[in-house]
Amino acid sequence: MINLSDFLVVSAGLFCTGLFIILTKRNAIQVLIGIELMLNAANLNLVAFGRYDKIANGGQMFTLFSITLAAATTAVALAIILNVYKRYKTIDPEKIDSLKD
Amino acid sequence: MTMERVMFYLMSVLALGSGIYIAASKNLVRSVFMFFVTLMAVAGLYVLCMADFVAITQVVIYVGGILVLIIFAFMLSGRETLSALQHPNNKFISINKVPAFLLAVLFFIVMLNVIVKGNVNNIPWNEKSVLAGEMMTAKDTTVNNIGINLMGNYLLPFEVVSILLMMALVGAAHLSRKERGL
Amino acid sequence: MNILSLLIFIPLLFGLIIVVLPSSLRAGFKYITLLATLVQLGISIFLYLHFQTGPGHAGINNESQFQFVQKLPWINLDLGALGKMQIDYFVGIDGISIMMVLMTSIVMVIAALASWEIKSNLKGFFVLFLLLDTAVIGVFCALDFFLFYIFYELMLLPLYFLIGMWGGHRREYAAIKFFLYTLFGSVFMLLVMVGLYLSVKDPATGNHTFNIVQMMNPANYDQNSVFTLFAHKTILGMPARTVGFVVLFVAFAIKVPIVPLHTWLPDAHVEAPTPVSIILAGILLKVGGYGIIRICLGIFPDIASSGAYWLGLLGVVSIIYGALNALAQRDLKRMIAYSSVSHMGFVLLGVASQTAEGVSGAVMQMVSHGFLSTMLFFLVGVVYNRVHDRDIYNFRGLGTLMPKYTTFTMIAFFASLGLPGLSAFMAEAFSLTGAFKSPSVNGYLPYWMAICGSIGILLSAGYFLWTLQRMFFGSLSLKGGDTWRVALTDLNTRETVALLTLTVLTLAIGIMPSLVFGKINDSVVGLIHFLNRT
Amino acid sequence: MHDLLPTLHSQLDQVIGSLPYFVPELYLTVLFVAVLVTDLIFGRNSGWICRILVIVGLVVVIYKDLQQLAFVVKGNPFLFNGMLLLTKTTLAFKVFTDLFAVILVAYFDWDDKLRSHNKGLSDLYTITVAVILGLHIMTMAFNLLSIYLSIEMVSIGSYLMVAYRAENKWSSEAGLKYVLFGAASSAMMLYGISLLYGLGGSLNLLDMTAGLAQANPPIASLALILFFVGIGFKLSFVPVHFWVPDIYEGAPTPVSAFLSTITKFAAFGLLINFLSPFTNPELLWRAFDFRLFFSIVGIATMIVGNFAATMQHNVKRMLAYSSIGHTGFALMALVTFTGQGLTVLTFYLVAYALAAAAAWMLATYFDDAAGAEDMAAYKGLGYKYPLAGICFVIVLISLTGLPLTAGFYGKFLTFSAVYQVYQDGHNLWLLLLMITGAVTTVVSLFYYIKIPLNLFLRKTERTTGFAAANSWLLTIVAIITILVVYLGLFPDFLTKYL
Amino acid sequence: METLTQQPGILTIQLALIAVLLPLLAAVINAFFPGKTNKAAGWVSTLAILGSCLVSVTVFFKVWNHTEVHQQWLWFTVGDSQFHAGMLLNNLSALMLSLVSLIALPVHIYSTAYMKGDAHYKRYFTYLSFFCFSMLALVITDNLFVFYAFWELVGFSSYLLIGFWYTKPKAILANKKAFIINRIGDIGLLTAIILLYAQYHTSDIAQLFSNGATGAALAAQMPGNAQWIACIGLFLAVAAKSAQFPLHTWLPDAMEGPTSISALIHAATMVAAGVFLLGRFYPVFTPTELTVLAVIGCFTAFMAATIALTQNDLKRILAYSTISQLGYMVMAMGIGAYASSFFHLVTHAFFKCLLFLVAGIVIHEVQHIKDEYQLDIDPQNILYMGGLRKKMPLTFIACIIAGFALIGLPFTSGYLSKDSILIQSFEWAEGKGLLHELIPVGALVTSWLTAFYVTRLIVKVFFGEFRLMEFDPTIKLHISDGNWQYRVPLMFLAICCLFPLFSYNPVLYEKAWLFSGFPLITGLDRVNIYHTIIPVLVNIAAILVMYWAWAVYMKKKALPLPETGFLFSFSYHQWYIDKLYEQIFVKPVMALSGLARWTDRNIIDGFIHLLANIGIAGAKIAEWLDRNIIDGLLHWLASLVLAIGNFARRFQNGRVQYYLFSMIAVILAIFIFKTLF
């Protein structure tokens, strides 16, 4: 049987990878992917903890919901991204900075 | 070294490796497919936590839903994004990535340190539930438990999510809809 | 309807009338305003005449001794552990306020007369003018700290616009500077006010209260409250009461203004249109002095005594520094503005001495300076309206061109440099008397401060005489040449009336100081006893 | 394996039992469906129907809200197995949320830019209703899941609202930034939640805190900080405030108004609910000093918001920064962690929301009337539109917090509440909070005054391009302004209900 | 109206009140009189002063050596101390009252002619009456503050009158200077008064100095520094009003005013107020301080006399002689010759006034000639005059009488008063050591110098030939004593300059009735040799000196001092005092240019420059502080706000990933900070 800490380490790894992706990628969609990675990391935590919570089963339930929400978010995000692409002909977050101080 | 462990290491290596590849590669399409691998691997990890149903959902929704969406997005916003395919510059460290890299690494170190310090392997309530035998084992199935929970404790979120999805649908549709009259 | 409330809200009423009147009647607005101020003057004269004196009417820290009191429950918030927040509409006057009120109403009439010069956007001007009027009177009448603060803040906005919309070239700068300066003071004042409120309990109801009179009584303070006298609490390591006093003092010192918090004043005065400069110099500076007497001394008598030396020092510095600055100016209005700084220094000096003479002198100085600065700014306004220039060097020998004007100017100048028989002399003499008496009576101030004060009088003679000689005497020569010679007509009736009134007033007070001293004396004595008791 | 079946019955009882407490939300759901259907039936030009529908519906909802007063007086009921918690404060927040929702929904259609959106506004109304529902749940949420869910719901709705004017590049840019920033921060929050769950062993806040108390401090505080990222994103306090100016500037003005006023209620309600178990005395919780944390955050937020606002030229952007600043000030009321603190907070939020809503509306007004978006363009408009100008001045005075406006009492009461707590245990941070509050008030004058300055003190040379702007808008603004002044004269009018 | 008086005095009080108020009435009437050059104005004032003159004389006879009348009314109350204003009529005040009005009357009459045809005829009389009012009130008031008030009001009216021709730049400068120097004195007086009040809690002179409290006694009661601060203040006041060294420089310049004014204010009455003040406050001084006074008085007398030796401006000579005589009086006070001092004050008032009136006539006439022939001369310069005795005999005689009185020759009033001072000074110095002897000796020398310059003046003006002839011989002298408005005052005053008015015995001052009226009299009994020897010695010497002067200026004998000699120029340039002030105080630059143009520098006053420069320098500094430090601080704060704001804005560069980066970085920082500390 595998220790919680192992799962946590893995999820931490995923999380930071996601972090790195969202900070560096030149493409909104990839940024989105990075976010998904972070979400997965969180979900992994939840599931791993949820293992000890058989009755209420909070972890797994939560994961289910979060996956759903992730889907919704992604859908909306992609819609917006496409919209932006229509206006700016690019989806590079770095290049989309007409709103600033 | 049980089978379980082997699987765990395999999965985690897959997940992290693919994740890092996504981070590293300039090539969008490849990175998307790598993402697919990651998701799969994570699903595998879910299974290792006795969360079979979640794993399935993961595969169905993510791989079946989100990933497809993303690919669609590529297709629609294709030109520029695909143009990256022609001349990918594959150097991993480009100067403007260094700070982000450092930050991520730092974050990781912090987390590790925290995890190690906060001896997560014997959190009080975990131990309690282990003693009470409320820890999931490979034998018991989670599906009907989940079903009952959805009908019971989690009824409200369940319903709310439906509205949420509806809203998201309406909104997304509105945004991506072609303007009439133009 | 309580007569005091009537006095306070009459201008507001007329203001509303002006608001509803169509702009087509704009020509009539100034008359409405004048009427409002006159009515107000009538009421305050009535108050003055019916104001009882005698040891039984000292006021200060004795709620029952205030006159024309009105006390209505106003805001009543139940805030759990905060206790009931009890804010009353509580107005009343004692000897010190009555003079301020009377002085204010008179100055307001003059200001109304002076605002004939306003040509643009009359509706706005007069509405703001009347709003300001209400606020000022309210400040002098309020006995509830909260109410006081409300009125105090209410003065800011009208003034901002009055300076900013009808002012001179650098009006924006002046207006914002004034606004920020004052707000800076008052925001921190708010903090201390809240602290006081939470420290004081009304013995009758057991609620926290904003009643200034209650705040004067040490017995009303909670034992473990921040501002209690018994336990020495600290804020940031400094004694709490000292901090409180200093914060309040700074807030008022900005208004007075006291060096080095005075730099808003020259700008504001110079940029403001004549009526506004009149109100600024004539009334607003007094709000500061009044606040120091009523609030700082009233609520923190202990600190006022221990810090008297520093107060006196600030006063002397203001006197000398202001006078020196005035000496250096070549813009007539600026010169007068700085002279106000110098003159208001005497108020602080007198107050700091904490002797009956000193405080009486201070109050007298406020009243007299109220009239004199009004007169001075009015006079400046006369020339400025004629030729739109105020530079002392651009005029010479006005004496031959505008004899009447010159006469009034001489009166105003000599009055302000303390010529006996005119009001300022009594004021300054008694402020100094207080300062000279202090070393032997309570030892708060050393002799040299008083002496420096008298040197200030000397300096004031310097700049006023210099201006007279430079501008009015000698053979006529104007920068503007003949166009100016034509433009510079002598005073018309309206101006003469205004100036004559002021002249008579300053003469009357100078010859019969009892007009003022008679009313304030009991309160002053009460204040001194109150201060000595702690 | 059927170990849950026995409890199912009781669970369902719980659910059924909770429904009466859930009436307003049910009505909202119905409203949502109704609006959706009308949208589908009448199609593109169904905007005005939906609008009326929503307004009427919301009024009904408010009515239902008020009916709930009966419940909260007898203690705070938990709903849906502790998913939600209904308290006096939450109820108040719900009521105000709906009230402002009514105003702002009406306002949507008065903004020329938004009205000219060529895909119609009906979808916007649909989304708005859903968001309001989300806000309701958010206010009451007492369970990590419901918290996360409601936040996501509101966020997603907000993304859509911000990006709604698809044909406008700024709107969509704002949308993009918003969605990326929001998704990222919600991901971080989710991670925090996962840790909280893991350490606390339950999704229910009460049990979770109980468990968390025994966890080891560093990891617990990491979890909490990550969690606060999510709430901070909604409240827009430092350091999660970066998105605010861009989004508020880019979004359609009514949407900015919506985000900057209504969302704050729910977010604060959420924060209060979340903190309540931590701050109750018998729980010996020392690992994480919330007062310290929020004091620092509050100070930083006040400073950043107000100081950065001093150099803004675009009115919407300036208002955005000022909203950040006000969040900071409101946090001040929060950190008292006392009953009256909450009362005061409510009053402050209401005062702020009133003034802010009016300010946004006026921004629209002048934009529509004279095409003025930058301060410079406001030159001399005060003479052209005196009523609007005067209202703007009063509203800004209220935002600054000068007397005879509601804003003043907001600040005043906040100071009082904090002072009270300070008096008991001379906590340095509270003092610093108050001082910062005072200083930033002065600073805020710096930028608020710019608008009156341009409106009245400066003269314009332009003579053309002055349209007759929407009189409805002006009426509402005037009413709000009067309300602001009335509250400034007689705050009892509001406080006696809190 | 609460009254504290002995009933019998009530009439006297009312009379005195009338005497004071009549001129005020006149002033008010004139002020609101139509027409700038209304003849009536002059007569209104004259009648008024005539009335008050008569009344005050009656008052004098009622009071002199009878009961002292004191009535006061409650003025106002401050704190728990009440302030009464009222009148104190004792010998001193009665004497001054009648003196002032007696002098004022002829001056008024004189002025009606002298100011005839002036553009501001009415204004002149308004001021004049106002001055009389203040002066009269000053002498009879009983309250310190009222006293101060009128003290300053006389200064004010002198300011107005010096600057009467306000278009003349020199006049304006002169009156500004006069007022400011007087202001210094006033501040001193105010300080002293306030200190006395603070000490004794009463402002009533009668109470304060009742039953001859001596300086020592007062000093004992006052806290150490308070007493000498008060005395310095008083001294400043005296020095400023009575033009004592070092504050004397305003008086010569004050001659810019109309000559009649110089006669009344700057010779007879106002300048004497300083001495009067000394009399009133006599008890405050301690012996040492009195000695200092004596020294200063003596020095002033000597210095002024020497300066007067060589001046050529007629009025200036008289002005310096006035200073010198005032020095006499102050010295007399210093040596305790209280009564003699007042005696001299009275006599001096008459003859100096007369001299000025004479000067006025002369100048007036010369002015006529100047205007007639457009000569470019200074009508006041005695070098252009001469031989006028034939043309204006009455004036000449008056001048002779007044001059002799000034010198102090027998049969004149001056003889009596001056000798009394001299004798008492010798008595005082006796046995006090050599240094003290300097004072009487100085006084003695001064009197001889006086004799010299008076003779010089008379000779140059009235003897010899009319020197303008040398300019152009065509001049026809049709000048005369003028009409009766000139003659009557001259005659009246001339009579007053003779001994009978004061003593039936022309040679023995001890017999003067004046002395009977004062307390603390010394040296009336002819105990020692001085009483015989000094008058003789002095007068013989004086006559010798006069002859010498006559010889010098009439017969063109060798000059007493070579024109080029140091002593001459030393005196001619008024002891270089003004230059001294410059050398010390005014910046070297100024001093250099001053050296280049020293002559007119001599007129401009270094002392005012000192004040001005200190003032201006201070002002510049203060202004600089204001603009740069205080406002600078303000602006610095503002920019600080902006700086912080800019820092916050730096993150808002519009890149969402940058936002995320900073956010995460901050959060991480917070966390690390939190876990570490």
Image (cartoon, coloured by chain):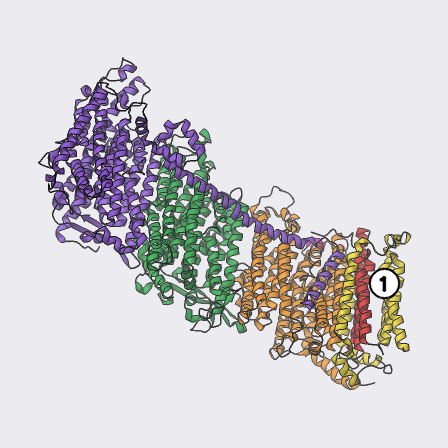
- Quadrant where the N terminus of chain D sits is bottom right
Classify 10 Å Cα crowding around label 1: few (below 14), some (14-19), many (20 and above): many
User: What chain is colored orange?
Assistant: D
Question: Could you say where residue C398 lies in the image, as x and y percent from the top left?
Answer: 39, 34
Vertical arrangement, residue E612 with respect to residue E205, above or below: above
Vertical arrangement, residue D165 with respect to residue C75, above or below: above
Q: Which residues are magenta?
A: D111-115
Question: Could you say where residue C242 lies in the image, as x and y percent from the top left?
Answer: 47, 62
User: What chain is colored yellow?
Assistant: B
Q: Colour of chain A?
A: red
Q: Nearer the viewer, residue E148 or C365?
A: E148
Q: Is residue C39 visible?
A: no
Q: Is residue D14 visible?
A: yes
Q: Nearer the viewer, residue E645 or D59?
A: E645
Q: Colour of chain E?
A: purple
Lateral position of residue C321 relative to residue B160, left or right: left
Lateral position of residue E333 relative to residue B148, left or right: left
Q: Colour of chain C?
A: green
Whether the magenta-drawn stretch holds residue E609 is answered as no
Lateral position of residue B48 relative to residue E67, left or right: right
- Residue at the farthest top position: E474
Vertical arrangement, residue E572 with respect to residue C305, above or below: above
Which residue in the structure is indicated by mark 1?
B20
